[in-house]
Amino acid sequence: MVVDDVAQDPRHAGATHAGLTDLSIAARITVPLVKHGRAAALLVVHQSEPRRWTETEVKLVQETAERTWAAVERARAENALRESELKYRTLFESMDQGFGVAEVSFDGAGEAVDFSWIETNPAFERHTGFFASADKTVRDLVPDLEQKWFDVYGAVAKTGEPTRFVEGSDALGRWFDVYAFPLGEPQRRQVAVLFTDVTERIRNEESLQRANNMLIDSDQRKDEFLAMLAHELRNPLAAIANTVKLMELVSSEQLSAERSQHFRDILKRQTNMLRGLVDDLLDVSRITRGLVELKQQRTDLKLIAERALESVQALMDEKDHEVSVTLPRKPLEVNGDPVRLEQIMVNLLTNAAKYTDPGGRITLCLERTHESAQLYVSDTGIGMSAEVLDRIFELFGQAERGLARSEGGLGIGLTIVKNLVELHTGSIKADSAGPGQGARFIVTLPLAPVEERLHEAEKKEPKAANREKRILVVEDSEDIAETMALLLEAAGHQLVLAYDGPEALARAEDFKPEVILLDIGLPGMDGYEVARRLRQNPRTRDAVLVALTGYGQAEDIERAHEAGFAKHFTKPVEMERLERFISTVE
């Protein structure tokens, strides 16, 4: 719109004219800018006096409008670019994912031969320790991944095909989920690499896999152990059953004293074997659960070693082993449980004897170091591989011995030994040069301080009353009850039997026993309830209650004492111990 005189132009009548007059506009040129079919802006040039605008002036205004709009659009684009760059840079700098741009170098044949990082964000540098540098190549960064990176990133730059993979290396000590894609067209030479640190995930997966493998291995070894346990239990049971059958077939007239003694020896030997197996199982259960309480006192390891050697002498003589013993001349004292310390030595010596062929050599050496005692037990036996050494002290983790299993045992002795040693604040280790090269076990225990003295007087055995007692045996197993009664009667005591709770209460009322041997696991009314009722009856409340049970954990013993039992015996009961206790009852 070109207006030479606003006052004379009919398009500016009325209010429009008045408004322009107030603004001292008498002549003007208005150039609209239409972009994409819409009015985008107006450029207005005016004067305070009327004038005739020339064609040149009009074209100049039009051109100025176009150039001004172009400048505005350029400024807007530059501002948008700056904002975009700021957003990109903020994201680039603050994102936790690593991001880098690598420039790939190609040879004349179009094969990638090298590349360097030309841009990296802080996360990239933080995760990898690498910084963008034109003179730093992949060869400098991670030598062990050089060829792989050539192949992978070179292929991305050459083909334009993106790729994704998990990458890591010993040099980095990290693992990443990597996404690599080309920047621009193929052969543009630049590859963008976006990666996320997945080291923790990879380590967790590896840890879970290791744990799963350990569980599978442990489960397999447990199954093997249970099969071995069944085998070991069946052997003495078969021998006992066969001996009993032979005794039934042989009449009393044909049973000579020598043959009778032979049968008794078989039964005693196999019963002792069964007791040993059960004791081992109970021991490993109590020890590994931390339920063993040591009865510690100042103990001479030299005397313990001598007793342990006596215990295994028969086994070593049977296999014609050469035994070498080195003991200190003076006492070697530690604070410990004498029974458990002897158990440690017996287990180690028995283990050496079992796995050493006849005629082999076994060595026991006990010596003093600076502040500790060291026990060495070595042999010339079957030895151990490195794999077996790694798990020799684990439950169910002992070496394979084949189907013959001529030596017997459950293979849990070393687990018991290790836990007992550690309960004495000591340590144990094993070494072997390999299969067939023998083995050595080294036990280290802290010495008792020189100035230490025992504060508790040595417990004395109570004097035996040495008179016959009236004894009530309450046991639901007739075989156990009757055999126990026969043994006690042979010792001169008066016996009455009961097979359940109500019968026990009735018999006790009439018999007025001095000692009641009471099975805890009775049917219907258990031993604790029977004990409670006996205590309520004036005729039986003074009887000495003795608990008989197959449960021998610490909590079982404590519960028995709380229920009023004077003594707790775990089945199978050692009759010598039972008779010694009964003899102390006044």
Image (cartoon, rainbow, N blue to C red):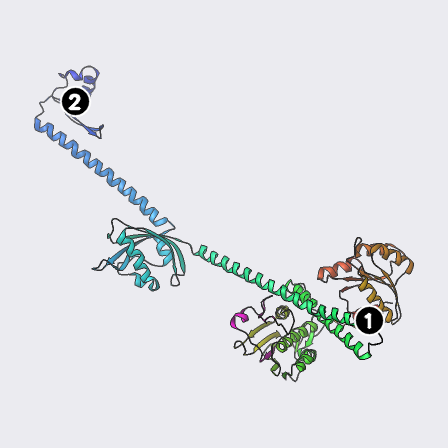
547 w.r.t. 341: above or below: above
Q: How many labels, in total?
A: 2
Residue 303 magenta-highlighted? no
Q: Bin the neighbour count of mark 2 within 10 Å (Cα to Cα): few under 14, some 14-19, many 20 and up.
A: many
Residue 360: quadrant of the picture: bottom right
Q: Mark 1 belongs to which amino acid?
A: Pro
Segment tinted magenta in the rendering = 374-403
Q: Closer to the camera, 499 or 236? A: 236
The dot on residue 8 is: none
Left/right placement of residue 585 relative to residue 152 reads right
Q: Residue at x 73, y 61 (%)?
A: 551
Q: Locate residue 273: give its quadrant.
A: bottom right
Between 377 and 301, which is closer to the camera in this rendering? 377
Q: Quadrant of the C terminus?
A: bottom right
In the displayed structure, does residue 293 sit left or right of residue 43? right
Residue lying at 87% horizontally and 69% vertically, measured from the top left: 489
Q: Which residue is mark 2?
A: 25
- Percent across and percent down for residue 356 are 60, 79
Q: Main secondary structure of the magenta part?
A: loop
Extreme-right residue of the structure:
510
Q: Quadrant of residue 556?
A: bottom right
SS at mark 2?
Answer: loop
Name the spot of residue 203 as percent of width and height, x first. Answer: 46, 58
Q: Residue 283: give x, y in percent of width and height.
A: 67, 66
Left or right: residue 484 versus residue 329 is right
Amino acid carrying label 2: it is: Ile
Decide which of tag 2 and tag 1 comes sooner along the chain: 2
Residue tagged by mark 1?
Answer: 462
